[in-house]
Amino acid sequence: MAGHENGPGRVVLAGAPLGNIGDASTRLREVLASADVIAAEDTRRLNRLARDLGVTVSGRIVSYFEGNDERRTPELVEALAGGAVVAVVTDGGMPSVSDPGYRLVRAALDAGYPVTAAPGPSAVTTALALSGLPSDRFAFEGFLPRTGSGRRSRLRELAAEPRTLVFFEAPHRIVSALADLAGVFGADRPAAVCRELTKTYEEVRRGTLAELAEWAAAGEPRGEITLVVGGAPVVAAVVPDDEELRAAVAEREAAGESRRDAIQAVATEFGMKKRDVYNIVHRA
C-alpha cells in the first residue's frame, strides 16, 4: 500500500465504523497500517480507532476537517506528487458524505491522481434500511440549515419530493427540526429517527412526524442522529378549467404580481406549461 518516491500517489477514502468496532473491515486495517499520510477528521479519535483495532500507524497523521480542509488540501496534493498514499478517515462512516474528503477528491482528480476507496459503514444507508420506509429511490439532503427560517424555506422546496428523504441533524436542533418538518410536510408524514447507530444505546423511533416531534420535545434525544422521512404521497393532478385558470392569474395580479409572474406561478402550481396558461389568459 505504501507509496514510492516519485511514484504515482493516490487517495484512499476509508470507511470507519459508526460506533461498533466490529464493523471495521480488513481493508481499513490495512490502509491505516500502510498509508504514508492519514488525513483524519479528529486525530485523537483516529489514534483511539487504531488502538482498538490493534493497528500500528506508521504514516504521518494530519488533521483534516471542515475549517482547515481548504488550507490542508494543497499540502496533501503535494504529498501525492511525491508518491504518497493519502488515506482519508472521518469520525465514522464514509468520507465525503457530509464529512471532509470531497475537496481533496476533487483536487486529486484535477491534478491527475487516482482516487479509490476502502468502503465501509454509512449512516445514510444504515438508517434508510432500518427506517421501514421505501428505499428503492431516496435523496440524501445532509444537514438542514441551522436557522429556523432557512430550514423552513428549504423544507418547502422539498415538500413535494416523492422520494424518501434522509437528513443528518444535530441533537440540539432535533426538536425544532422535527417541529418544522411536521409543520411543512404535514403531521401525518411517516418518518424515523435513528440515533447512535450500531452503538450500545442505538435507538430507532418510527412514527408520524407529529408523533416524533412530540417524543423529541419530551426527551430531547442525544447522540448522532439520522432522520429518514417518507416522500410526498402521489396525488392525482387536478386540471382546472380555463375560467379557473384565468381567475387564479387575476387573483395574483390583484395581489400585486406582474401578469408574467402570475402566469408562471399558476403554471407551476397546476403542473402546466407556461405557454398554455398564457394562451388561455390572453384568449379571454
Image: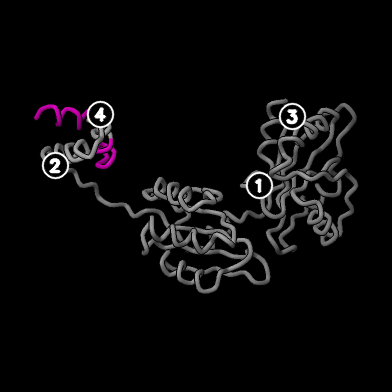
Task: From the image, tell me which residue sits under label 3.
Answer: 113
Please identify the residue farthest to the left as the structure is shown: 284
Q: Picture coordinates of residue 284 (x, y %)?
A: 9, 30
Task: From the image, tell me which residue sits under label 4.
Answer: 260
Q: Which of the two discs, 4 and 1, labels the residue nearer the N terminus? A: 1
Residue shown at the point (80%, 58%) measured from the top left:
49
Task: From the image, tell me which residue sits under label 1.
Answer: 99
Q: Which portion, as a residue range, is magenta?
A: 265-284
Q: Nearer the viewer, mark 4 or mark 3?
A: 4
CB under 8 Å between callouts 2 and 1?
no
Splitting the image into 4 quarters, where does residue 220 fall?
A: bottom right
Task: From the image, tell me which residue sits under label 2.
Answer: 244
Q: Nearer the viewer, mark 4 or mark 1?
A: 4
Relative side of 28 to 166, left or right: right
Q: Is residue 246 visible?
A: yes
Task: Give the residue type at disc 1.
Answer: Asp
CB under 8 Å between callouts 4 and 3?
no
Q: CA distance from mark 2 to mark 3?
A: 59 Å
Task: Give the residue type at disc 3.
Answer: Tyr
Task: Give the residue type at disc 4.
Answer: Arg
**Magenta stretch holds residue 57:** no
CB under 8 Å between callouts 3 and 1?
no
CB under 8 Å between callouts 2 and 3?
no
Residue shown at the point (18%, 43%) measured from the top left:
239
Residue shown at the point (55%, 59%) measured from the top left:
173
Q: Residues within 10 Å of mark 2 (few under 14, many from 20)?
A: few
Q: Which of the two discs, 3 and 1, labels the residue nearer the N terminus? A: 1
Q: Which of the two discs, 2 and 1, labels the residue nearer the N terminus? A: 1
Q: CA distance from mark 3 to mark 1?
A: 21 Å
Element on which disc 1 rests: loop
Q: CA distance from mark 4 to mark 3?
A: 50 Å
Q: Nearer the viewer, mark 2 or mark 3?
A: 2
